[in-house]
Amino acid sequence: MQNKQLFTVIFGLLLSHFFKAQVTAPSYHSPLGIPLKLSASFGDLRPNHFHMGVDFRTEGKVGLSLYSIEAGYVARIKITPLGYGRVIYVNHPNGVTSVYAHCTKFEKSIQAIVKLYQEKNQLNEIDLVFEPQQIPVTKGQLIAYSGNSGNSFGPHLHFELRDTKTENALHPLVHGINIIDQQAPVPSKLYIYAIDQNGYYINDKKIAFPVIKKGTEYTVATNKIIIPPAFMDGTNKLLIGIEGSDKIGADLSTCGLFENLLIVANDTVFHSRIDTVSFSHDRLINDYCDYHEYKTNNKKIHKLIHKTHNHLDVYKSDPLKIINLKGHDSIPINIQLLDAKKNRSTIKFDLVYRYTLGKIVVDSKPSGLYLSPDSSYYFEDFGNSITLNALSLFEPVKKDIIITKDKIQLGKASTPIFEGAKVTMTPIENTPITKQYIYLAGDKDQKEALKTQLINGKLEASISSLGTFKVGSDFTPPSVSPSNFVAGDTSLKKNSIEWKVSDAKTNISSYNLFINGKWKVLEYDKKNKLLIHVFEPSEKGLINFKLQVKDACGNEALWTKKIRVN
Ligand SMILES: [Zn+2]
């Protein structure tokens, strides 16, 4: 047994060595049969995640053939109402997995395997993993058809490359997908923030400076940024943020920044390159960018700082190398922006601080008044509690916490959390616990139902932001109404039957369709609130439809009807 393991390890090492050598120059087959045009690139900043692949345009259409970029085997197929919708993963012998998301359907023989599994297990949403011999594919083989399923707003192909072993997302344009790119990134604005020795904001202020082009390089007005003394607020450290875009491809699609360097007086203090991202680190983006600006003004500001606790693979320089003002300073700043094809832009200016710095405040956010990202916390009252682990917070948060019988209130819903935070709440009295759920009460009266579990007689939910949390109850079944026909119809001449579904308080948690008593596959298009069943050729004549839809609190809507299908 031990010998076998050893053999596997050595063989694995040999393989990975061999494949590393192979990976350097792959010549992949195109995933599409039309010229590749991007609508978004890898690493583009999104709320709560980096864009983990590239989006290829599909001429505004669904149903374009998708081809496996390399020989290998179908390793995974997933169907979900949101996210990637219908997605297919192909593992290749070079240690890379290619991913094709938002499909409308899979290739005929693959589709048949999927449908068989769905019907046998009566599951609409699936996550299937396959062995190498089950569905082998050749390079350029048709595997699926492009679409708009899941969290896609307009037909396109979301395409990813991943390291098969670690499942880390790889930048397709750095790892073998070739797209012409001759334009260097274009910076638009610089931002200055005052920070402390941990890289935390001193105040929530920032100053913006438009970037201007002078000759072949970029700078700011008068080639310098003069720091107002009051702005520093008792610190001598500052952080630069940058906003800009990069045009990629023959059609000059606008994408995000890729690689940023900050050189202070010939010393490279910061270097980031969004070439690979681990899915488990994805939410750290909320600290990579200026989350508040993103949420409130849709600004994509890349912060040129590597904070100690941020483990994103995109940081290529040591943490906390910070710009330090000493007083009467003029510091030459050089920022380099590079794209995946090494096109480069340079921004040069001087940071000027004309005053003698006052007394430096070392602890700008004292632990007595603030919750620190380094510590874990547990607050409880009236049986309601909130738990924050070390690293749950990105920035210190004011210790203004209110826990009453009815709510837990800490910070704002615009304060992001990385991971490991939860709220536990006492159920409302004289109300069945299964009908209760925790929700995040928004600043403007919105209520966002959280995925709530019942644990030891309490309600519990993981949280991804701070804010005000309360308990609600839901006794109302989801609403179900005909969508591609009207309620009075007794016959239907369509190739599908569709219903509009929604739940006023929580979410749709299950949906099952029975045709003449037999379970049938349903597609849930969550963004359009639609349930869709595509008729099989045999589904003709007078048919008994029975549709069951449940919400997260188990309230069930039942829709039944006899309709003649032509
Ligand atoms: Zn995408």
Image (cartoon, helix red, strand yellow):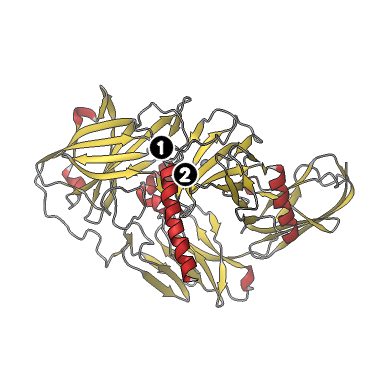
The residue shown at (9%, 42%) is 328
Q: Is any atom of residue 46 visible in this view?
A: no
Question: In the picture, residue 343 is in which quadrant?
Answer: top left
| Residue 295 position in % (x across, y down) | 43, 46
- Residue under label 1: 256
Considering only vertical position in the picture, is 453 above or below 519?
A: below
The extreme top residue here reads 215
* Residue 41 or residue 130, whichever sits in front: 130
Amino acid type at circle 2 is His
Q: Please state if 389 lies on the left or on the right of 217 as rendered.
A: right
The extreme bottom residue here reads 456
- Residue under label 2: 51
Callout 1 secondary element: loop
Ligand 1 within 8 Å of the CB at mark 1: no
Q: Is any atom of residue 65 visible in this view?
A: yes
| Residue 490 position in % (x across, y down) | 88, 45
Q: Please state if 549 lies on the left or on the right of 132 as rendered.
A: right
Considering only vertical position in the picture, is 371 above or below 205?
A: below
The extreme right residue here reads 542
Considering only vertical position in the picture, is 304 above or below 245?
A: below
Amino acid type at circle 1 is Gly
